[in-house]
Image (cartoon, rainbow, N blue to C red):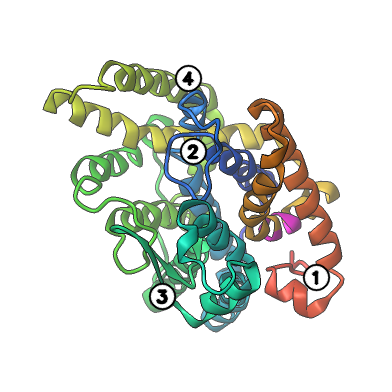
């Protein structure tokens, strides 16, 4: 099986996509949307800026992962893919659920329902109870533990990678090459994402529950498969089209975001007409693809050649992803007594989270067992 030529910009795209998670999740502390802990200064002030990336940031990660999994399958075949993805994803998931995610659950209960804490309310008592399993409920709002919280990406990706490898291993037929014009790459992938937003999302909203999450599975499987196909003759035209359309895709994405912001303000307190609601959902679904296409195009301009620094950063981002949300939650609670202005506090959270996660990566990569549990590949394969 031929291994496709390496695309250096995929490393840059991966680094940027994962790095975006830290400021985004710091932002979740300050908005009115539901999250594990909330700032006393939480408001809707930064929500429009959060919505610049919320429609597409996770789908972009699955698109990149699809391309990476196709390259892995080309090198190692079905069994090698199963072994690699299981070690790379499931071990960090289990360790993360048992150790890394626990502070998030603790501070969520401490700040929202402290009367539910076991023992004397300390962290160690909670951790012992957390590992035994159970539920913490405040009315109808329940948290089941152990939980994977932000690590939900790992089991989803594991399932998609194994399904993709199994389907391709069984197919055994050469794939045809599609020679689509650039405009087709702008419109065709956007159509199913828009239809899913209109017809599936209202009935099966996002849950991050592996079993009951139809809308997320539908959109993430689609972009994962497209990423996989982009490393084959079937959809290899995606990357040149993204480069060609980068300005158009960027402009359309920003215009769509602006229209959706205006729609949200106009109907913040009143239900919109049904036709307008459908139009907004259609635009929101299509925006998911247009923004990803813009990212893919601009990444090719920004990361056009191999770089040791970029390869090193790409090797670190998975560990930072595993650690970052717990670090944000803990730091936010440690900084809260200082009563800093929320803007200064947010900058401190972003800087300190990057710094602490980078230090943790630098230390963990020298400890083989710990490196494995934090998803660190000590010897990256080309």
Q: Read off the magenta span.
A: 315-319
Determine whether the residue tagged by mark 2 lies in a helix, strand or loop. Answer: helix
Q: Predominant secondary structure in magenta?
A: helix
Residue under the point 61% across and 62% down: 103
Q: What residue does disc 2 label?
A: 292
| Disc 1 from disc 2: Cα separation | 30 Å
* Of pointers 2 and 4, the one earlier in the residue sequence: 4
Determine whether the residue tagged by mark 4 lies in a helix, strand or loop. Answer: helix
Q: Is residue 46 magenta?
A: no
Residue under the point 57% across and 43% down: 25
Asked if residue 141 lies left or right of residue 365, the reply is left
Of the pair 65 and 91, the residue shown nearer to us: 91
Residue 172's disc is 3
Image marks 3 and 2: residues in contact by CB distance under 8 Å: no
Image marks 1 and 2: residues in contact by CB distance under 8 Å: no
Asked if residue 250 lies left or right of residue 331, the reply is left
| Disc 3 from disc 2: Cα separation | 30 Å
Q: What residue does disc 1 label?
A: 379
Q: Picture coordinates of residue 85 (x, y %)?
A: 57, 73
| Disc 1 from disc 3: Cα separation | 31 Å
Residue 251's disc is 4
Viewer can see residue 2: no
* Of pointers 4 and 1, the one earlier in the residue sequence: 4
């Amino acid at each position: 099986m031929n291994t496709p030529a390496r695309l250096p910009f995929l490393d840059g795209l991966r680094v940027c996509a994962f790095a975006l998670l830290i400021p985004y999740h710091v932002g979740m502390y300050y908005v009115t949307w539901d999250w594990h802990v909330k700032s006393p200064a939480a408001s809707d002030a930064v929500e429009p800026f959060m919505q610049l990336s919320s429609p597409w940031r996770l789908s972009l990660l699955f698109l990149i992962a699809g391309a990476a999994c196709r390259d892995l399958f080309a090198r190692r075949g079905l069994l090698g893919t199963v072994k690699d993805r299981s070690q790379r994803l499931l071990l960090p998931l289990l360790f993360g659920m048992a150790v890394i995610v626990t502070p998030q659950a603790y501070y969520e209960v401490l700040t929202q329902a402290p009367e539910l804490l076991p023992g004397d309310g300390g962290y160690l008592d909670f951790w012992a109870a957390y590992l035994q399993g159970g539920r913490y409920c405040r009315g109808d709002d329940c948290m089941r533990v152990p939980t994977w919280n932000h690590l939900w990406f790992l089991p989803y990706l594991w399932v998609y990678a194994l399904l993709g490898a199994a389907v391709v291993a069984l197919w055994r037929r050469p794939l045809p090459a599609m020679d689509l014009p650039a405009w087709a790459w702008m419109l065709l992938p956007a159509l199913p994402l828009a239809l899913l937003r209109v017809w599936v999302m209202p009935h099966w909203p996002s849950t991050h529950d592996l079993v009951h999450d139809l809308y997320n599975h539908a959109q993430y499987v689609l972009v994962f498969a497209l990423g996989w196909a982009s490393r084959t003759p079937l959809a290899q035209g995606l990357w040149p089209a993204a480069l060609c359309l980068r300005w158009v895709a960027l402009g359309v994405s920003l215009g769509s975001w602006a229209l959706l912001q205006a729609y949200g303000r106009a109907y913040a307190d009143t239900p919109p007409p049904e036709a307008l609601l459908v139009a907004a959902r259609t635009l929101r679904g299509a925006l998911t693809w247009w923004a990803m296409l813009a990212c893919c195009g601009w990444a090719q301009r920004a990361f056009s050649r191999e770089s040791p620094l970029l390869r090193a950063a790409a090797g670190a981002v998975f560990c930072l992803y595993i650690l970052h949300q717990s670090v944000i939650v803990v730091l936010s609670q440690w900084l809260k007594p200082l009563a800093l202005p929320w803007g200064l506090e947010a900058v401190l959270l972003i800087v300190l989270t990057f710094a602490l996660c980078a230090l943790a990566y630098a230390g963990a990569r020298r400890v083989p067992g710990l490196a494995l549990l934090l998803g660190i590949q000590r010897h990256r394969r080309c």
